[in-house]
Amino acid sequence: MENNPITVHAIINGEKVVAEKNSPRENPTHPDEIVGYAPLNTKEDAVRAIEAAYDAFKSWAWSDVDDRIARMQRAIQKIKDATPEIAHLLSREHGKALYDSQGEIAISLMWMEFACEHVKKVIAPQEKEHENGRTIITFDPIGVVSAITPWNYPISLSTIKIAPALLTGNTMVVKPSPFAPLAVSLVIEIIANEFPPGVLNLVHGESEVGVELTANPKVAKIAFTGGTKTAKSIMKAASDTIKKMTLELGGNDAAIVLEDFDVNDERALRRMVISNFLTAGQICMIAKRVYVHRSIYDAFVEKYIEAANKWIRVGDPFHPDVTVGPVNNKNQVQYVKSLVEDARSKGAKVIELGKIISPELMDNGYFLQPTLVLGADPHDPIVVEEQFGPTVPILPFDDEEQVIELHNESIYGLTSSVWGEEEHAIKVARRIEAGTTMINTAAVQGLDVRFPFGGVKQSGVGREYGEEGLKSYVETHVINIPKTLELPYIPE
């Protein structure tokens, strides 16, 4: 067990700021080990960071886009060089398996590179000559962006905001989650060091910091990933100044398995298992409920259990055989347990899945053995709520109308997946209410940073990734030069 805690700091106007108080971050694998400390910044620190970003925007908004790209590319290379150190730290503070941490950094870099390649196209001015004269359309930066990011994918869900914001000429203040603040701080520091002081600022802290980042009148846009309940508070705080916002929120993503799905397709079943249990089920776009056509239900469950028992190996994130590490924090462990026990108390069957690689850790760390829940009612909490942990209910359905209704009655609509013969699956997918629907795969396996990502209904507002993700950080400015300055129907 390691015992070399690090301390990260706020970055305001290009300077590291030492806080009077720090908050420890424990290791979910060994909760008695402190991985590091993050500052407990104050409201006053948040105000200073916003002021620094506001002042920096005055010149950064007019900076050359080629210079912005070059700076971001230098940061990308430095993150690549530091990936082993960053991934190791992320697994220690988060609990995700090392391959998973490396994958998160890879996705982050992939997106940052895409943003560098496409930003010039997205913000290029358009000029049109027409019968009424001439029109110029520019795509201008919005201003100061406050980004509040979660603990489950702290690096990718920060860079998904930082890259487009800075490349399009905005300035930023970023606040990570206290449940995974360390590795992401290293990444943000690398990026901030490549940009002028004040362009990218970093603060940590509790609710007073978050409130300032959402209510301060000098903040022009909020980029938030997290829970729907918190998002409602953010929208209220932002309403006085009508801030722009991108909100990627919770989901209760469903997988629909049609009667023509091949239950003997081992690779497809493995993809399904991974879509349920990657990162111990703590991904917004994980498949959290599975509906299977009754005609293949029994065979599917049998083959699913076989596939799960092959892939799921629970234990120390640094063990080379481990695929599922601990849950990130104690509260999440208790919440997931409560959902499983509620289903069990109502008569559902709970089946433990996978192999325990590190049995000596199970009682002390925040570990949960992954479980399959059979026989739950379609309206039980374990089905309709976002579990955000290593458990999944599988339910039978009788016809497509029924399962589409079960899917669409949810208040959420982030991602979904349909499994079966391709054209049949696409036909069903077109009737699904979701921001993204994947065919014969799900979750991160089906993510493509080239295309927009976001939710419908209470799963969010706006889109990230793709060119649309870049466009969400600019304002459209129309400059009209008409040929005739007077309109003929207005009397002199």
Image (cartoon, rainbow, N blue to C red):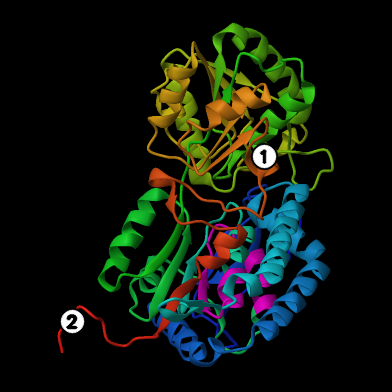
Q: Earlier in the sequence, mark 1 or mark 2?
A: 1
- Position of residue 181 relative to residue 477, above or below, is above
Closer mark to the observer between disc 1 and disc 2: 2
Pinpoint residue 289: horizontal percent, then vertical percent: 53, 28
Relative placement, left or right, of 486 versus 425 is: left
- Of helix, strand and loop, which one carries label 2? loop
Image quarter of the C terminus = bottom left
Q: Residue at x 67, y 77 (%)?
A: 191
Mark 1–mark 2 Cα distance, whole angstroms, equals 66 Å
Q: Pinpoint residue 347: horizontal percent, then vertical percent.
A: 45, 12
The residue indicated by pointer 1 is 278
Q: Disc 2 marks which amino acid?
A: Ile
Q: Position of residue 284 (x, y in %)?
A: 54, 45
Res 325 seen here: no
Query: In the rendered view, does 272 fall on the left or right side of 382?
Result: right
Specify the segment rendered in magenta: 162-191
Q: Is residue 184 magenta?
A: yes
Is 66 a magenta residue?
no
Circle 2 sits on which residue? 490
Closer to us: 233 or 440 = 440
Left or right position of 440 against 486:
right
Q: Amino acid at mark 1?
A: Leu
> Residue, x 43% and y 51% (percent of image)?
460
The structure residue drawn at horizontal position 41% and vertical position 15%, both measured from the top left corner, is: 346
Q: Residues within 10 Å of mark 2 (few under 14, many from 20)?
A: few
